[in-house]
Image (tube, grey):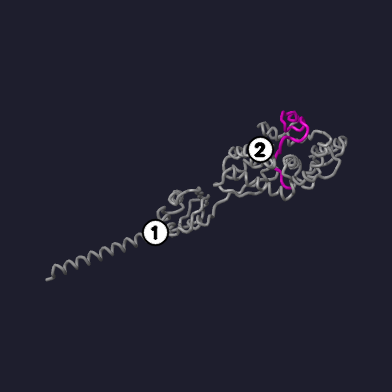
């Protein structure tokens, strides 16, 4: 017969073997679960945008990814991250649309492979147009941007101390913004681009009059070669104390008051606004849009002419005139061209 000691040792060995077997099964189970949660890929249902704001914890990031259907298990993602703590996860907006596993997702966040919104600002856009472009890109509301554009003039205080808005200094360009950037940062990026171009073309620190003139030139013609000629007309009119009579400035005055109906009519020329250059001599009180480099250069370096008038030729260009009589003949030509269509 086996002694009590032998039976005890056999029982302990059996229990120990069972324990290790259960432990092995648990390890295998956890390992299988982890492998499934980490390596098994997911195909998002369409485009999934996930916004991870600065300051989010790893747990919050994992929860956002899980709720968006990008990863299988938040705890597995957290565990994997803690095993790779040397790689921090970057804040930003991410687009998930391709089949990927949690490792792929973790790598993207560690690289900071964020989604950017492209915002195209053409030459001549007003701050209202810029605000709409920001909104159309999904970066916020137009009103949020206009709030900054009409109040954050500290951005240009050194170059345009009398400016009431950022109009004229939101430089036309193609920008790439993220949803973690605020409106102040977007406006600052546009002003920074303006400053860079201003330095390159030699625009002085007191820029407001030049930028105002450039904004009118920008609105009057899309032909770069004509811009110095248009500039000469307006500078000649200023020198001779003749009202500029620039239609785009009247339109801008109506835009500011929400009165522009989409077309300029004869009665609009009597519209009460300091931007109405038919009623008020000299330059308007500020830019009427955001000019590009070519118009800024034309305002800095106008052509030397004796022109005082110009009018469209009906084919995308303009006819220039020294006298009112010559101008009236050009207007008659334009009428014949437009009536013949």
Does the segment drawn in magenta span residue 282?
yes
**Residue 160 versus residue 32: which sits nearer the camera?**
160
Q: Residue furthest bottom?
A: 1
Name the main secondary structure of what is drawn in magenta.
loop
The C terminus is located in which quarter?
top right
- Residue 165, labelled with which disc? 2
325 left or right of 45?
right
42 left or right of 178?
left
Q: Which range of residues does the magenta coloring cover?
A: 266-293
The N terminus is located in which quarter?
bottom left
State which tag comes first along the sequence, 1 or 2: 1
19 left or right of 239?
left
Question: Residue at the location (35% across, 59% down)?
Answer: 30
- Residue 34, labelled with which disc? 1
Position in image of residue 16 (x %, y %): 24, 65
Does the segment drawn in magenta span residue 237?
no
Position in image of residue 268 (x %, y %): 73, 30
**Residue 67 versus residue 51: which sits nearer the camera?**
51
- Residue 236, labelled with which disc? none
């Amino acid at each position: 017969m086996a002694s009590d000691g032998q039976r005890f040792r056999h029982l302990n060995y059996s229990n120990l073997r069972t324990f290790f077997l259960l432990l092995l099964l648990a390890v295998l189970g956890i390992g299988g679960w982890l492998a499934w949660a980490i390596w098994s890929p997911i195909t998002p249902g369409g485009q999934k945008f996930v916004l991870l704001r600065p300051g989010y914890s790893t747990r919050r990031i994992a929860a956002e990814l899980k709720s968006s259907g990008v990863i299988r298990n938040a705890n597995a993602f957290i565990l994997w991250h803690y095993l790779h703590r040397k790689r921090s996860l970057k804040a930003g907006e991410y687009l998930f649309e391709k089949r990927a596993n949690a490792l792929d997702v973790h790598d993207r966040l560690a690289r900071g492979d964020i989604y950017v919104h492209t915002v195209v600002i053409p030459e001549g856009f007003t701050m209202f147009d810029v605000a709409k472009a920001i909104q159309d890109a999904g970066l916020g509301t137009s009103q949020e941007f206009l709030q900054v554009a009409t109040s954050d003039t500290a951005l240009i205080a050194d170059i345009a101390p009398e400016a009431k808005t950022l109009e004229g200094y939101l430089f036309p360009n193609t920008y790439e913004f993220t949803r973690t950037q605020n409106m102040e940062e977007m406006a600052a990026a546009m002003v920074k681009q303006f400053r860079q171009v201003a330095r390159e073309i030699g625009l002085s620190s007191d820029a407001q009059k030049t930028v105002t003139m450039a904004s009118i030139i920008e609105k009057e013609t899309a032909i770069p070669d004509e811009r110095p000629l248009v500039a000469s007309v307006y500078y000649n009119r200023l020198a001779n104390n003749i009202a500029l009579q620039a239609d785009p400035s009247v339109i801008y005055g109506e835009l500011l008051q929400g009165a522009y109906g989409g077309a300029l009519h004869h009665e609009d020329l009597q519209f009460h606004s300091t931007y109405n250059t038919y009623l008020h001599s000299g330059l308007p009180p500020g830019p009427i849009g955001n000019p590009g480099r070519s118009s800024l250069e034309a305002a800095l370096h106008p052509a030397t002419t004796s022109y005082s008038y110009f009018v469209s030729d009906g084919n995308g260009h303009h006819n220039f005139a020294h006298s009112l009589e010559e101008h009236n003949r050009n207007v008659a030509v334009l009428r014949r061209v437009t009536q013949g269509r």
